[in-house]
Amino acid sequence: MRIEAYSQVQQIYNNSKVNKAQQTKKTGDIRDTVSFSSIGKDIQVAKQAVKATPDVREDVVAKFKAAIKNGTYDVSGEDFADKLLAKYDEANGLA
């Protein structure tokens, strides 16, 4: 083991002096500012529009409700099967 190397390292740490922190000068009443880009503003407007939109579009649902109530709503078995199989393929990554 080299004792000289340890002594040299120890000398470096012993000789370092701790400086006191200097007090900063006040430069007046400076305030931080924030600015948003136009894209950020557009995104915020879009979020508010989506939030204000209802989850159910009553104008579209109303005609289906009326057709079901009147007994005139007819679904083709083939169309239903085709859509069901398409959804199955999409869910399983086959499409």
Image (tube, rainbow, N blue to C red):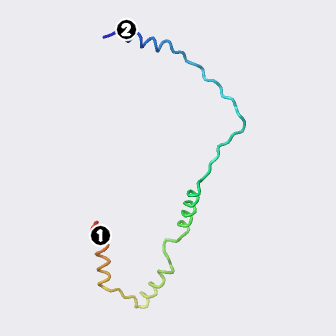
Left or right, 5 with respect to 43, comes to: left
Left or right, 29 with respect to 40, comes to: right
Q: In the image, what residue type sits under mark 2?
A: Glu
Left or right, 69 with respect to 34, comes to: left
Residue 37 horizontal/vertical position (percent): 58, 54
Residue identifier under label 1: 95
**Looking at the image, which residue is at 56% across and 60% down?**
44
Query: Toward the viewer: 86 or 80?
Result: 86
For numbered disc 1, what is the local secondary structure?
loop
Which quadrant of the figure has residue 47?
bottom right
**Looking at the image, which residue is at 37% across and 88% down?**
74
Residue 36 horizontal/vertical position (percent): 60, 53
* Looking at the image, residue 6 lies above or below residue 27: above
Residue identifier under label 2: 4
Which quadrant of the figure has residue 31?
top right
* Looking at the image, residue 6 lies above or below residue 81: above
